[in-house]
Amino acid sequence: MQPNMESLKEKTAKGLFWGGMNNGVQQLLGLAFGIILGRLLDPSDYGMTAMLAVFSVIANELQSSGFKTGLINLKAPKHDDYNAVFWFNILAGAFIYVVLWFAAPLIADYYDKPELTPKLIPLSRYVFLGFVFSSFGMAQSAYLTKQMQIKQIAHCGMTATLTSSIVSVVLAALGFGCWALATQYLMYIAVNTLLLWYFSTWRPSYLRFKDLRFTFYEPLKRLFPFSFRIMLSAIFTQVNNNIMNLLLGRYYGETNTGHYNQAYQWSSKCFLLVENMLKQVDQTVLVGLDDERERQLAVLRKMVRFTAFISFPLLFGLALVSHEFIVLAIGEKWVFSASLLPLLCLSGAFMPLSTLLTDAIISHKRSDIYLWNTLVLGILQVSVLIFLWREGIFGMVMVYTLLNIVWVFVWQFFVHRLMNYSLLHFLKDIVPFALAAFIVMAVTNIATESITNLWVKLLSRTLIASVLYYAIMRLSGAVILKEIQAFIFKRKR
C-alpha cells in the first residue's frame, strides 16, 4: 500500500507542478502581452470579441459534448473509445460551424446595434473557426490527461500562448483592432492542437463502415448518459460565466462591455492559474481512488487546502493593487475597469474551490447533480441580472459576485452527501487562509494608504503583502507550505 501511496502522491505533485508551470507561464505571458494589447487597443475592441465569446464557447461545448470528460472518468478507456470521440468531435464541429455561419446575422441583431452589424457578422464567422480547429485535439488532450502527461500538455499550452500573443500584438500594432484579438484566440487553438498531436502517441483510425456499430455507435452510447449531462452543465456554466458580456453588450454597448471584460480577464488570469492547475490532475486522481473512500477524502481535503492557500492571497492581493496596476499597466483609459476589478477578484477567489468541488462530484459519476445545480445557478443569475440591469453595472457585478460565492457552499453540500466532507471540515480547510489573506491585505492597505506615487504604492503593497502572508503561514506552521517547499527543494536537488 505504501509504494502505491507514494507513487500517487508523486504523480499528483508532479501534475500540480507542471499544471502550475503551464498556467503560470501562460498567465505571465498573458500579463505581459495583455498590457501591450491594452495600450494598443480600445475598450470597444475588447467589447466586440467579448460579445461573441459566449456563442463560441457554447458551440465548443456542443461540439465536444462532454466526451473528453467522459474519457477521463473511464477507468481504462480503449482505442475505440478515443477513436469514436475523435470522429464525433470533427463531424459535430463542422455541422455546428455551418449552423452558426448562417446564424451570424441573428447574433448581430440580438445586440440591437445596427452600426456594428457590418463588422460583427464577418468577425463572428471568423471567431467561430476556433471550435472547428479544437475538434481535432479533444481526444488527444483527453489521452494525455488520462496518462498524467501533464508536462507535455504544459509545453503545448506555453508554446501556443507565446506564439498567439506575438501574432496578436503585431496585428494590433498594424491597426487590425478586434481582429487581432480574434486571431490570437484562433492561433492559440491551432498551435495547441498541433502540439497535442506531436506529444500524444495515440492516433485515430479510419471508421470501418461495416463495423460502425461497434467502433463508433457503441462507444458513444456507453459514454453518452454521463457525457451528455456534462455537456449541458458546461453550456450552462459558460452562459453563467459570460452572462455579463451578453447583457452589457445589449444594454450598455461595446465600450462598457470592454471595460467589464478587461477587468474580468485580469481576475480570471489569477483564478484560472489555480483552477487549471488542479483540473490537470484532480479528476484522474479522485477517480483512481474510488475504491478507497477515506483516502480519497483525505486527498480532496489536501487539494482544498492547497487551493485556498494560493487562491485567497492571490485574488485578494490583486484587489488590493487593482487601481495602481490597471492605470500603470494599460493606462487611464481603463480606470473604470479598475473600479470593477476588486469585486471580480472577490468572486474569483472562490472560483477554484467551486471547480474542485464540482470535479469531485463528477468523479463520483454524479453528472446529474452537476447539471441541475449549474442550471439552477444559471437561472438565478440570468433572472436577477435582467431584473437589475437598470441599476447599473456595479449592482450587476455585485450580485454576480455574491451568487458565485454562495454557490460554493451549495457544491460543498453535495460533496458532503457523496464523500462525507462536512461543512465544519470544509470551513477548517479554507477559513484560516481566507482570514490570513484578508488581514494581510487590510494591514497592507492601511500601511500604504498615504503613498501617492503609484509605482511606489504598487511595489510596496506587493512586497509587504507577500512577506506578511508568508510570515503568517510560517509562524502558524501551515502544513501545506511545508509540503510545497519540500517538493520544490527536492526537485532542485
Image (spheres, rainbow, N blue to C red):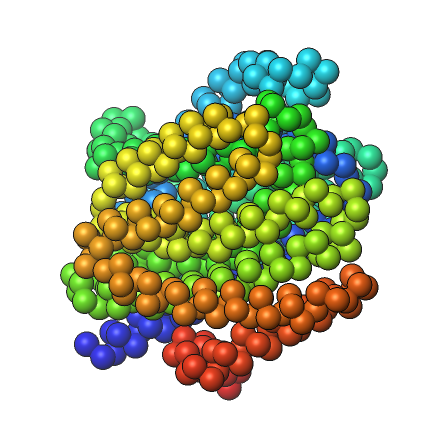
Q: Is residue 412 visible?
A: yes
Front residue (pair 407, 415): 407
Looking at the image, which residue is at 67% across and 35% down? 258
Q: How many marks?
A: 0
* Name of the residue lying farthest toward the right: 174
**Residue 101 at x, y = what percent?**
55, 18
**Residue 149 at x, y = what percent?**
42, 60
Q: Is residue 280 visible?
A: no
Residue 476 image-quadrant placement: bottom left
Quadrant (top left, top right, bottom left, bottom right) of the N terminus: bottom left
Work out whether 487 lies above or below 83: below
**Residue 362 at x, y = what percent?**
28, 47
Looking at the image, which residue is at 78% across and 33% down? 176
Position of 272 with respect to 27 (left or right) is: left
Residue 256 image-quadrant placement: top right
Front residue (pair 342, 111): 342
Position of 39 with respect to 377 (left or right) is: right
Front residue (pair 416, 392): 392
Residue 426 image-quadrant placement: bottom left
Looking at the image, which residue is at 66% across and 25% down? 253
* Name of the residue lying farthest toward the bottom: 493
Looking at the image, which residue is at 49% across and 55% down? 349
**Residue 48 at x, y = what percent?**
66, 29
Work out whether 384 lies above or below 262: above
